[in-house]
Image (tube, rainbow, N blue to C red):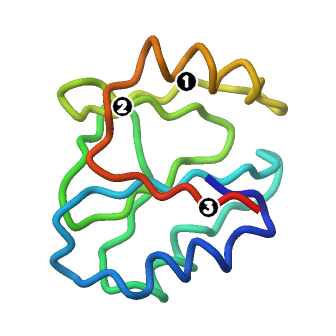
Amino acid sequence: MCSTGGLDAVIRILEPLPAGFAAATIVLRHHDPRGKNNLAQILARRTELPVTLAHDGGVLAPARVFVAPTGYHTLVAADDTLTLIVSGERPPYHRWRRSGIREHCAPLRSAVFARL
């Protein structure tokens, strides 16, 4: 998880990962939903792993980077299915982290959280 200033940290984490990295990776970025989000394209140029924008109903897969779309909470079910929930302009991140993750998310195989 990163804010706008955390992009360099995320890149430093993803760049050395090999193409066959055995885990799925999710990148979450706090970003104004009214602006353009080209994070997936930026990261795709900096890692050997395929990078895709997460979508509702998508399934996590090893050796892939999933970028959470702006304006949505991204949940991961026990069967690795992704569910996107509209969060609006200003998501309640402080409440979401405490309640939503514990109640709705299964443990992830791997997650990249870079916070600056």
Q: Position of residue 89 (x, y in %)?
A: 82, 33
Depth check: give the residue in front, 65 or 105. Answer: 105
Of badges 2 and 3, nearer the viewer stands 3
Q: Secondary structure at mark 2?
A: strand
In front of the other: label 2 or label 1?
A: 2
Query: How many C-alpha atoms fall within 10 Å of the one at disc 3: few (<14), some, or many (≥20)?
Result: some
Looking at the rendered structure, the secondary structure element under dot 3 is: loop
Residue at position x 25%, y 84% in the image: 18
Residue 77 locus on image (x, y percent): 30, 25
The kind of residue on which mark 3 rests is Ala
Which residue is tagged 3?
Answer: 114
Q: Earlier in the sequence, mark 2 or mark 3?
A: 2
* Residue highlighted by disc 2: 76
Residue denoted by label 1 = 85
- Residue 55 in the image: above or below residue 64: above
x and y percent of residue 56 in the render?
Answer: 39, 33
Q: Give the CA separation, mark 2 to mark 3.
A: 19 Å
Amino acid found under the numbered disc labelled 2? Val
Q: Which mark is residue 14?
A: none
Please state which amino acid type lies under the numbered disc 1: Ile
Is 21 displayed left or right of 41 in the figure?
A: left
- The percent position of residue 109, horizontal first and vertical second, equals 26, 47
Q: Earlier in the sequence, mark 3 or mark 1?
A: 1
Q: CA distance from mark 2 to mark 1?
A: 11 Å
Residue at x 82%, y 49% (from the top left corner) = 32
Say how many tags the image has: 3
Q: Secondary structure at mark 1?
A: strand
Label 3, label 1: how many angstroms apart (C-alpha)?
22 Å
| Residue 3 found in image quarter | bottom right
Quadrant of image for the C terminus: bottom right
Could you tell me if the residues under marks 2 and 1 are in contact, i.e. CB atoms within 8 Å?
no
